[in-house]
Image: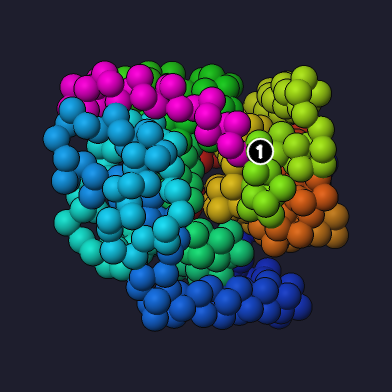
Amino acid sequence: MNATSPQVPCDLNGPDATKTNLVLPGIILAIGLAMNLAQIILALGNGSQPSDFFVFWSAACFMAGNDPGSFPAIYDPLALADWQNGLPFTSGKIHPFAYPPTLLLFLRPLAALDYGTARILWLAVSFAVLGLAVGAHRRPVLWLVLAAAPASLMNIAFAQNGFWMAALVAGGLLRLERAPVLAGILIGLATIKPQLGLMIPLVLVLARAWIPLAIATATAAFMALASLFWLGDGVWLAWFSVLDLMAAETSRHVASLAPWLASVPAAMLASGLAGPPVWIAQLALIAGVGSLLLAIARTGNRRALVAAGLLATLAATPFSYVYDSVLALPAIILTFSSLAGPTSTRLGRVTLTALWFAPFLSIEFMPSGLPALPVTAVAVAILLYLETRGASDPLLPVGDTGSA
């Protein structure tokens, strides 16, 4: 970029958008929307179809049907499986609950609904919240983007929490300037899935977002204390005691799980590596991604830092599934709508397209040991750095364009 040239936001609906540069995105969105609608119709027609959501719903039913003294059994895979086998729509398999006790605070209302209804509402409400988080209520085209994304297809198919997590993390980072208290609360709530928050504190420090950082810390602490008061310390002890077992089981079954896993350690395990090399590589990745965030922060470009922070979250997490790729959608939207440079070159467009389709690429290549999602996420983050390093004037704070 020319250091003396102003940076002009790229408006997908503006006068510079020609028929030529909208044909391919239009085709991609149409195909994606058709696939996702087909998945939704399938889900509506099979209300009892097993999915990952059964874990959340069964945990809620367990809390509704038992006294608090027995809540630690939620983290006993065999005890929980016995309970699950007595519920409607069980698949007969073991569905362990590995999330921290803070998530249990929010799951309890699900027990008031039957499985099929609860699953549909879980997906619909979380999708709506994600749309609001990225500003789709101000730019309706973003509803189409979210609805057509391959990442959304994965989350719908698994009935997982990808929409929720993307809404919390992206919703927080996009509001650091405009609504710092709300940003901190959202980021604090995101600790219900702590492995996805590895790089977020660094992003907040680099952005000098001290109020959101303090509020996020207080929110996480409040949730922990609330869960300790309501659920008891036995639940926390049970969760800590089962973490090693969950990690060992994932490693043992990595060959069968590989298509759905998405992290660098999982890719290395799938390729036959194990032990210190895996974690040395993970630490090196964290250091490299952290250095990239630091370099972007030094440019003063807050939008690029937020987008790269979301991508770094995906790239550096030690454990993730393909449905966690929903976190990349706000970064893609922010790059297209506010950062013109990465979309102005063929390499930039190809790299962003690869990130868009990364969930499909991940399913194809993870069994061979190639982590498509982290690779494409880091590639786009590098492009963001290359685009912003020569800018003389930082872009406006994230909240100023109405995109969030």
* Magenta-drawn stretch contains 301: no
| Residue 371 % position (x, y) | 75, 45
> Which residue shows up at 56% across the image and 61% down it?
154
Q: Nearer the viewer, residue 224 or 164?
A: 224
Query: What is the total number of numbered labels drawn onto the structure image?
Result: 1
State the SS at label 1.
Answer: helix
The amino acid on which the numbered mark 1 sits, given as a three-letter code, is: Arg
| Residue 237 % position (x, y) | 35, 19
| Residue 401 % position (x, y) | 49, 49
Left/right of residue 6 with respect to residue 368 in the rendered view: left
Mark 1, residue position: 252
* Magenta-drawn stretch contains 236: yes
Q: Nearer the viewer, residue 52 or 200?
A: 52
When the figure is inspected, residue 221 is found, relative to residue 395, above or below; the finding is above
Q: Which residues are magenta?
A: 224-250
Q: Main secondary structure of the magenta part?
A: helix
Instruction: Check the image and tell me how it is coloured.
Output: rainbow
- Which quarter of the figure has residue 390? top right
Q: Is residue 307 visible?
A: no
